[in-house]
Image: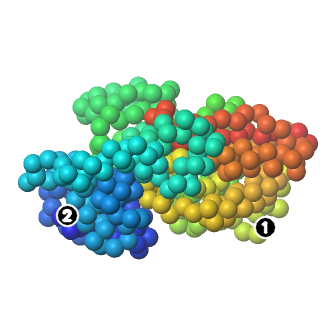
Amino acid sequence: MKEAVVRSLEKVFVEGFPADDVVKLVLVQNPKWGSRDRRFIARSIYDMVRYIRYYAYIADVESMPQRIEDFQVCAAVYWELTNEVLETDGPSEKIKTRQPLADAIPAIKESIPDWLFEKGVAQWGDRWLEEIHALNQEAAIYLRVNTLKCTVDQLAQQLRKDNIPFEVVQPTCIKCLQKVPVHQWKTYQDGWFEIQDIGSQHIVSGIPFRSNSLIIDACAGAGGKTLQLASITKNEANIIALDVVPKKLEELKRRAERAQARKIQTELITDLTVSKYSKTADVVLIDAPCSGSGVWRRKPDDKWKLTPNRLSELQALQKKVLHEYSDMVKPGGMVIYATCSLLQEENEAQVEDFLQQHSSFTTVDSSYVLPSSGGDGFYRAVLKREL
């Protein structure tokens, strides 16, 4: 099993596979492992992906691990520190010597590339340490109650009946207090709720949507926020979900049917889409492609794959979609620009640049949801078109 962990780390850091996919694959390939062994494998892979720089430093690996031997010594350090290696009498002298040194260097202790650590400190100051520490913790499971099919009280009553520990953290948001097989529940299959992080739910909450309005979700993906919009507007708004990936829109259709979200229309983006809907929408949601720095808790390998060049490419794409897709909102309507990023150049800087070039828009609201509050990190700006 330990060899499987080491090989999995190689797949993530050398071959570039997403950590989620690697964990799923190794578990599928070894169906005879018991539940305890499967937890050991998954926990070891995710923990080491999160903290690989920390364990590499203690193991005295000179740079980010790339060789199988590097992953082996890093894994040995991890298992020793977490008491997974029961045949030892305690930490080795090397670990006793190097662990305090690692703990004294914030970027190493929280295991983040230097350039991202420095960028975060420049923007957030000492608060950045709290946020990157939060992003290294295991993500909680949040449920968004689908009020098209049930109430919070009804779902809570069923959870109590099933002996599932939970907490109602917002009017339509429930936090599960332990890891549970949510997808297997009949209430999930019946569409009573969607799995959606509390930070993600913030993006379209608290906005006064009018009945019979036209809402365009311009970067809908598989439709988590699209379905939330349908629930908030009680199936009274017309919602058009756009994306460039057909498979995601097909998944959205299946999810909408399960949720009884009846007024969602899916459409593949083409070169003619913006002109087709020019100045027609009451609300345009632009959940822009981004670095994902607010969701490293769920995708810890992304912080190692992000580069300054890739960040620049994402900024150019964000600028393009904001400037182009905003044309679909009509005078008096709103653009909601959102990212799952904590980096200023993807957020406030993009909005400021947009407003400088589009004098007909003004800012109604601009806010962050930070990982230290319990969920993922998100940014939202609400912009109103005056003319």
Image quarter for residue 6? bottom left
Secondary structure of the residue carrying numbered label 1: loop
Q: Residues within 10 Å of mark 2 (few under 14, many from 20)?
A: some
Labelled disc at residue 346:
none
Depth check, mark 1 against mark 2: the one in front is 2
Provide residue 109's location: percent of width, then percent of height.
Answer: 40, 46
Give whichever of 363, 349 is nearer the camera.
349
> From this viewpoint, is residue 117 visible?
yes
Residue 26, can we see it? Answer: no
Residue at point 84% right, 51% down? 279
Q: Amino acid at mark 2?
A: Lys
| Secondary structure category for the residue under label 2 | helix
Q: Residues within 10 Å of mark 1 (few under 14, many from 20)?
A: few
The kind of residue on which mark 1 rests is Leu
Q: How is the image coloured?
A: rainbow
Task: Give the camera-side residue of 186 and 376.
Answer: 376
In the shown orientation, is residue 3 left or right of residue 273?
A: left
Q: Earlier in the sequence, mark 1 or mark 2?
A: 2
At 25% from the left and 51% from the top, the residue drawn is 95
Residue that badge 2 annotates: 2
Residue 64 shown left or right of residue 378 in the figure: left
Q: Name the spot of residue 152 as percent of width and height, x first.
A: 44, 28
In depth, the one of 288 and 293 nearer the eye is 293
Q: Position of residue 11 (x, y in %)?
A: 36, 71
Residue at 64% across, 30% down: 206
* Residue at position x 67%, y 46% in the image: 344
Which quarter of the figure is the N terminus placed in?
bottom left
For the residue pair 301 and 113, the one nearer the viewer reads as: 113
Q: Is residue 99 left or right of residue 307?
A: left
- Mark 1 lies on residue: 272
How far across and down, in percent of the image, does residue 251 sit?
Answer: 50, 60
